[in-house]
Image (cartoon, helix red, strand yellow):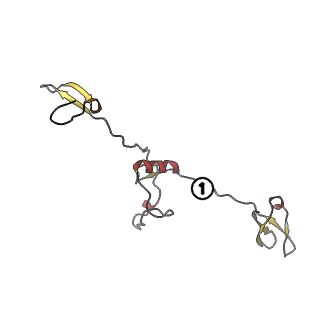
Amino acid sequence: MPIYTFECQSCQRKIDERRDVEDRRVPIPCECGAVLERIPESFGVDTFEAYYDEGLGCDINSRSERKAVMATLGVVEAGDHVGGARNHDTKAPHQMEKQPLKGQKFKPFVPSDPTINTHDDNGRVVNSKKMSELPEYKGNDKLE
């Protein structure tokens, strides 16, 4: 059974009472002679405000994005879950606030495939190949 809060409009007395859902709107007589009426429940909404994360070096637009960026970088959050890992600096209170968006998307590091160029005596490129296209070097100056 859920617990409902009731309040008297005359004496402002409040009580919490466990009731069946069907009986939640039935008023309760108050000691002052008036009637206690149910106070409607309020529900909290946890919202997310996008911000620039200076530690990750990119804008964070959702909790899931932050989690994915941290997983990609292989980092874990340090510090307490409420205040974070920052130490309070009274000379720089702005550092405690979330930073405004800077338009920097997360770009994961992807190892590139370097290009190897062969030049002639005049410095012109005569051959260009990606490193992945070259045969493997096995030692003894032999390419296989």
Residue appearing at x 19%, y 28% in the figure:
118
Q: Position of residue 84 (x, y in %)?
A: 46, 62
Above or below 90: residue 43: above
Query: In this orientation, which residue lies closer to the viewer: 50 or 25?
Result: 25
Within 10 Å of disc 1 (Cα), the crowding (few <14, some 14-19, many 20+) is few
> What is the residue that sits farthest to the left in this orientation?
121
Residue appearing at x 52%, y 51% in the figure:
63
Residue appearing at x 72%, y 60% in the figure:
41
> What is the residue that sits farthest to the top in this orientation?
126
Q: Quadrant of the N terminus?
A: bottom right
Q: Position of residue 71 (x, y in %)?
A: 44, 50
Above or below 100: residue 129: above
Above or below 127: residue 76: below
Q: Quadrant of the C terminus?
A: top left
Can residue 61 be seen in the rendering of this structure?
Answer: no
Label 1, on which residue?
46
Q: Position of residue 130 (x, y in %)?
A: 28, 30
**Quarter where residue 33 is shown:** bottom right
Q: Position of residue 62 (x, y in %)?
A: 52, 49
**Which secondary structure lies at badge 1?**
loop
Number of labels in the image equals: 1
Q: Amino acid at mark 1?
A: Asp
Query: In this orientation, which residue lies closer to the viewer: 95 or 106?
Result: 106
Can residue 50 be seen in the rendering of this structure?
Answer: yes
Seen in the image, is 113 located left or right of residue 144?
A: right
> What is the residue that sits farthest to the right in this orientation?
33
> What is the residue that sits farthest to the bottom in this orientation?
31
Seen in the image, is 47 located left or right of residue 111?
A: right
